[in-house]
Amino acid sequence: MGCGRVGSTLARSLEDRNHTVSVIDSNPDAFRRLGPSFNGTKVTGYGFDQAVLTEAGISRADAFAAVSSGDNSNIIAARVARESFGIDQVVARIYDPGRAEVYQRLGITTVATVKWTADQVLRRILPAGAEPDFRDPSGTIRVDQVPVPEHWVGQRTIHFQEQSGSRIAWIDRLGEGMLSSRETVLQENDVLHLVMREENATRVYDVLKKDPETD
């Protein structure tokens, strides 16, 4: 539901991945954003109207995204999709981060636009380790994006993991993601995506700052 910039981009991205997509918007002119190559269904109406959802084929849907510009419309539509039609994969776009947290606790996955954008900016202007890229809902596990320090270049990833107590989820190398093995050696300009326990973060960054321990 919602064929603004986010909704139209999402719809085209899903179709590019060979998914069948239906788009609902109350303004028929909004469908122009989908472009002439879009092959999905376009339904004019409100996404919280059960008749409109039925016309869009929700009975056959695996997921529903409410990404209009209105918080209230998105939440109502998300609840109708989940509670009336039994759709498990439901996401609602919410501008108010406080309300987003409430609905998250009710089991509706939310994307708080303002908070997400602010978090992305924070992660890029604060020192490494100040803010993780991801933290699980319990606050126990975090994922951090860290450039490899010069003094760790040439070291095997297994040595870094053993000394830091973290795990390397993947490495960004020369513009591509790669999974490391026991034999992988860290290279200049590598970016590590580290998984660690929250209480272990200080130790991980201390290890990053120091020269590797030798056997």
Image (spheres, rainbow, N blue to C red):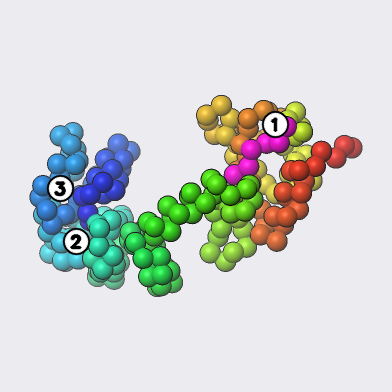
Point 52% across, 51% down: residue: 122
Give the residue displayed 15% in from the left and 45% down from the top.
Answer: 31
Is 120 one of the magenta-colored residues?
Answer: no
* Number of the front mark, 2 or 3: 3
Of the two numbered discs 2 and 3 on the same chain, state the one appearing first in sequence: 3
Between residue 98 and residue 154, name the one nearer to us. Answer: 98
Magenta stretch: give its range: 145-150
Gap in angstroms between the C-alphas marked 2 and 1: 49 Å
Image location of residue 133, percent across then percent down: 55, 50
Quick one: SS at disc 2?
Answer: loop
Question: Is residue 107 shown to the viewer in this render?
Answer: no
Percent across and percent down for residue 140 are: 62, 63
- Give the quadrant of residue 94: bottom left
Labels 1, 3: front one = 3
Q: Which residue is mark 1?
A: 186
Relative to 16, is 47 above or below? below
Mark 1 is surrounded, within 10 Å at the Cα level, by few (under 14), some (14 to 19) or many (20 or more) other residues, namely many
* Residue position for label 2: 47
Location of residue 116 in the rendering, given as x and y in whole percent from the top left corner:
43, 55
Disc number placed over residue 29 in the picture, else none:
none
N-terminal-most mark, 2 or 1: 2
What secondary structure is marked by label 3?
helix
The amino acid on which the numbered mark 2 sits, given as a three-letter code, is Gly
> x, y percentage for residue 169?
61, 44
| Residue identified by numbered label 3 | 30
Q: Position of 109 compared to 81: left or right?
A: right
Query: How far apart are labels 2 and 3 at the CA level?
Result: 14 Å
Residue depicted at 37% across the width and 70% down the height: 99
